[in-house]
Image (cartoon, rainbow, N blue to C red):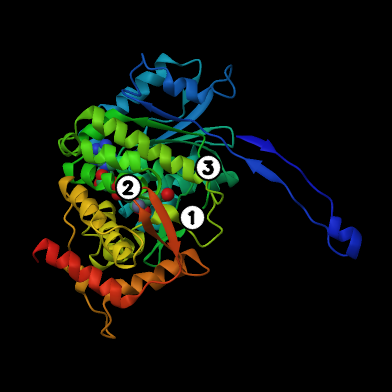
Amino acid sequence: MTVDIKAVEGDHAAAEGKVSWQRFQVSYEFPVHFTRSLFDPQNPVFVETLTRLEPDKRHRCLVFIDDGVLTNRPDLKPAVIDYAKQYGDQIDLVSPPIPVPGGERIKNELFFTEDIQQRLVDHHIDRHSFVIVIGGGAVLDAVGLVAATTHRGVRLIRVPTTVLSQNDSGVGVKNGVNLQGIKNFIGTFAPPFAVLNDLDMIDDLPPREKIAGMAEAVKVALIRDSAFFTWLERHADNLVTFAPEAMAHMIRRCAELHMHQIGHGGDPFETGSARPLDFGHWSAHKLESLTHHHLRHGEAVAIGIALDARYSVMAGLLAEGQDVRICSLLEHLGFRLWHPALETTASDGMVAVIKGLKEFQEHLGGELTITLLDDIGVGVEVHEMDERMVLQAIAWLKSRAGA
Ligand SMILES: NC(=O)c1ccc[n+]([C@@H]2O[C@H](COP(=O)([O-])OP(=O)(O)OC[C@H]3O[C@@H](n4cnc5c(N)ncnc54)[C@H](O)[C@@H]3O)[C@@H](O)[C@H]2O)c1
Ligand SMILES: [Zn+2]
């Protein structure tokens, strides 16, 4: 992280004699590596990352590992310990790696957040020590929150282990846990020290998880990069069989597009109402909760993309036929673009998913801002959605699915 502080003494204060303005800017930078066999002693990426700022120091490290990763890869714990021994002059592993619960349960119980925080206390982790978290998006979010808040922020190295966390959430700047049943109710914006994507980790994932993460690649291609969309179409056969080269390119390009949006989109800490990376997400978030998370996030996003693509055509933004093209790609990748929850009605008789619009607006704050498509690769913001047309788009999805 480089810090550039410019404090400007009150220009207005001089005029008014009452107000002093404080202004400064903080700029962030962190590397995102794409590698394989991260803890193979021959691979220098981890130790080089750790010693990037202080090459001559022995760095204190506390490692947390998603227990879902350990189930498939029990040798990871000894591998981390051996790696630390190999680079003993630089790495001080203050404890054997600590398993933590994988998936949403770690975010649903504050007990886990407190327990992780206790480990940082026990091992005297200070602002120059490192917390290393290896796991899916949920574990990254929970451990990330602990790292960001302990001593007001200790260094965090993320090692994402799912497609979604490698191509989307892991390269971002957010963390959080759930409270009172509200998703990500507590959290911070806190860029990590580094992100190390080990593509081998993806091999162990269940196929359903691998497919789910691809929805984010389709999403970001549709709003930002038509060439990537065409690439996804051409390589759908390879992606559906999880061919390593195709998976590696899909993950890397998707991660880069997310990084570009966060770094150059003008609002990394989301102070405005627009959230282009949440294309297709207003209905997806609602579908996730309506199905009690039976639908994985990416599965819900695929349906949300299909819905908003159809709506974009109906609204006269996207050319006729492009909605079918988008749906065909998603189906080719293995997504089902229909779920009965799309027709669930709320107690007031309204189709429940439409309430997702209001909830999306409340979550972002400010005026409703939904990203739709002007073309493949070109997102466009709108500030209202016609409920009748949303219902027609839902009916269209239903008839396509033959449901
Ligand atoms: N911070 C952000 O910007 C951001 C963005 C998007 C999503 N998220 C969050 O990410 C979470 C979803 O993350 P996810 O989709 O990565 O899934 P996940 O973290 O829920 O993990 C899914 C399951 O896979 C297991 N797992 C993880 N890696 C594995 C591996 N390599 N092999 C075998 N099993 C493995 C986990 O134990 C878990 O059971 C949600 O909580 C969501 O809110 C955060
Ligand atoms: Zn998403």
- Most extreme residue toward the bottom is 348
Point out the image quarter for the C terminus: bottom left
Disc 1 or 2, which lies upstream in sequence?
1
Percent x, y of residue 299:
23, 54
Q: CA distance from mark 3 to mark 2?
A: 18 Å
Name the residue at 51% across, 28% down: 60
Q: Is ligand 1 closer than 8 angstroms to the Cβ of mark 1? A: yes
Name the residue at 21% across, 50% down: 330
> Which SS class for mark 3?
helix
Q: Nearer the viewer, residue 284 or 61?
A: 284
Mark carried by residue 187: 1
Q: CA distance from mark 3 to mark 1?
A: 20 Å
Q: Are marks 3 and 2 in contact (CB under 8 Å)?
A: no
In the rendered image, which residue does mark 2 sit on? 216
Q: CA distance from mark 1 to mark 2?
A: 22 Å
Percent x, y of residue 334:
16, 47
Q: Is residue 108 above or below residue 2?
A: below
Name the residue at 18% across, 50% down: 328
Q: Amino acid at mark 1?
A: Gly
